[in-house]
Image: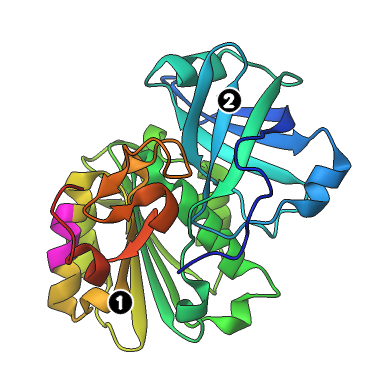
Amino acid sequence: MTCQCEIKNPYLPYQMEILEVIEENPEQDLKTFTLGFLNEDDNETFFYTPGQFAEISVFGTGEAPFGIASSPTEKGIVRFSVKKVGRVTTALHMLEKGDIVGLRGPLGNSWPLEKFAGKNLVIIGGGFAFTTLRSLVRYILDEENRKNYGNLTVVYGARNPGQLLYKEELQDWSARADIDIHLTIDRPVEGWWGKVGFVPAVTEQVVTSSENAVAVVCGPPVMIKFTLPVLKKIGFTSENIFTSLEMKMKCGIGMCGRCNIGNKFVCKDGPVFSMAELEKLPAEY
């Protein structure tokens, strides 16, 4: 699962302009930033695939890694959804349309699209970890790519409707015939039209077969912990379950030594791993 999208100098950031800021939740601590390249030549040479990440720098404050939420089929922009949880993310949340940030990347490997070709896909996400899954779904739904994949099932959950990312896009997907999408929240809320229940339970309800299928799981650790046994019960093998260790990403190039698990560096060898690969590593993820 090594991506061929290499950058020339991994230390040198691209200069990016914030084109749009979308507040994703009522608490206003979750925003999606759409970035555009200041230099058109950079735009022409920036190639990535779903599942990769990048370091976003706020000048004078620092940088932090984020999964790329846009799809490479969305030309000319790169999108990130950021939860305000620390110094860099707080500084990023204070920026507005027209401000300039740095982007170092693309980094890491990607979802193994070559292994997904011809397969049915079950994509399972929770909370604000849906970013790189959004990239993957957008990529598959593109008219040039949709024919290369089988049935597409998406299970996405959050604590309440307000915490779901990309709400308008989720509605658009729900209206399509070529994607089977199941949205769920933890507890009943008046006016909610989707499912109610935790992601593992909903997955067990709606995913009935592992035949010619792969599963992609990304979300809070507790969600992944209880979803994996469900997938095994349905019949998915460890080789056909993939996840991303985004919470372990650090400097992006494996130089700081803070992302290693056993002999693997999440920033270089990941962040995407199959469960078969993870089962060979120390349980430190």
Q: Is residue 227 magenta?
A: yes
Q: Residue 136 in the image: state x and y as whole percent.
A: 52, 61
Front in this rendered view, residue 144 or 42 = 42
Residue placed most toward the observer, 176 or 115: 115
Residue 224 image point, x, y percent: 22, 54
Compared with 11, 27 (above or below) is above
**CA distance separating discs 2 and 1:** 35 Å
The percent position of residue 135, horizontal first and vertical second, equals: 55, 55
Disc 1 marks a residue whose amino acid type is: Asn
In percent of width and height, residue 2 lies at: 49, 66
Earlier-in-chain disc, 2 versus 1: 2
Quadrant into which the N terminus falls: bottom left
Could you tell whether 129 is left or right of 225 in the image? Answer: right
Q: Is residue 117 visible?
A: yes
Query: Which residue is drawn at the image coordinates 73% and 31% (left, top)?
Result: 16
Kind of residue sitting beneath label 2: Ser
Residue on which the image places disc 1:
240
Label 2 sits on residue: 57
**Label 2 neighbourhood size at 10 Å, few (<14), some (14-19), many (20+)?**
many
Q: Residue at x 58, y 25 (%)?
A: 57
The way the protein has been coloured in the rendering is rainbow
Residue at horizontal 58%, vertical 83%? 148
Task: Report whether 119 appears left or right of 260.
Answer: right
Nearer to us in this view, 64 or 122: 64
Seen as rendered, the residue at the extreme right is 40
Q: Is residue 260 magenta?
A: no
Magenta stretch?
Answer: 225-229
Q: Main secondary structure of the magenta part?
A: helix
SS type, badge 1: helix
Provide the secondary structure element on which disc 2 rests.
strand
Look at the numbered discs 2 and 1 and tell me whether their residues touch, using CB distance below 8 Å: no
